[in-house]
Amino acid sequence: MIRFTLLFLVMTVLFLSGVIVGFDQAGEGIENIRGDFLNQYDAVQIHKKDQEPIEIQVMGRTLEEKKVQYQKIENDHMTEKLAFAMEKGVKWFYNQVIQGVYKISELLYRI
């Protein structure tokens, strides 16, 4: 019985340590996919050189890149709104068809 308990505890410790190592590796993989190789950086950085326009970086990217990224997100929201409107139309049409079929079947059963 003691042997079984010790074996069970050792296997549990090995399993949990593997889970912790796996979470760490998954987090590093996600950071690599996102392109966030910098572990620490300031949210906003401003670079100014003499006689040149001011360059602003937001979270490691230029302001123009962030604007493009924001526009893509806004376009996605528009797509969601369009999809929601289409969903409502399709549901309405489906309900009308079902009600029509129900009325027809109701008439047939009355005969």
Image (cartoon, grey):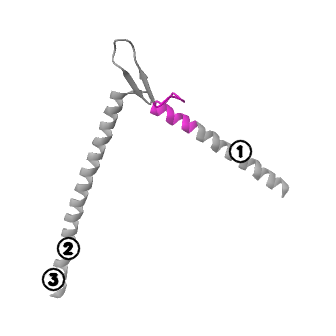
Q: What residue type is labelled 1?
A: Leu
Magenta range:
25-43
Q: Is residue 46 left or right of residue 6?
A: left
Where residue 107 appears, x then y in whole percent?
Answer: 15, 83
3D distance between C-alphas at marks 3 and 2? 12 Å
Disc number lying in front (3 or 1):
1
Query: Which image quadrant is residue 63 in?
Result: top left
Q: Residue at x 63, y 44 (%)?
A: 19
Residue at the extreme top of the image, as rendered: 50
Q: Residue at x 80, y 55 (%)?
A: 5
Q: Indicate the quadrant containing the N terminus: top left, top right, bottom left or bottom right.
A: bottom right
- Residue 99 got which mark? 2
Where residue 36 appears, x then y in whole percent?
Answer: 48, 30
Give yes or no for residue 42 being in the magenta stretch.
yes
Which badge, 3 or 1, is on the more N-terminal residue? 1
Q: What residue type is labelled 2?
A: Gln
Q: Is residue 17 left or right of residue 34?
A: right
3D distance between C-alphas at marks 3 and 1? 69 Å
- Residue 66 got which mark? none
**Is residue 79 depicted above or below 27 in this figure?**
below
**Element on which disc 2 rests:** helix
Which residue is label 1 attached to?
14
Where residue 53 appears, x then y in whole percent?
Answer: 33, 18
**Element on which disc 1 rests:** helix
Between 50 and 39, the one nearer to me in the picture: 50
Q: In this view, does 16 lie to the left or right of 66?
A: right
Crowding around mark 1 (Cα neighbors within 10 Å: few <14, some 14 to 19, many 20+) is: few
Which badge, 1 or 2, is on the more N-terminal residue? 1
Give yes or no for residue 95 being in the magenta stretch.
no
Q: Indicate the quadrant containing the C terminus: top left, top right, bottom left or bottom right.
A: bottom left
**Is residue 81 depicted above or below 35 in this figure?**
below
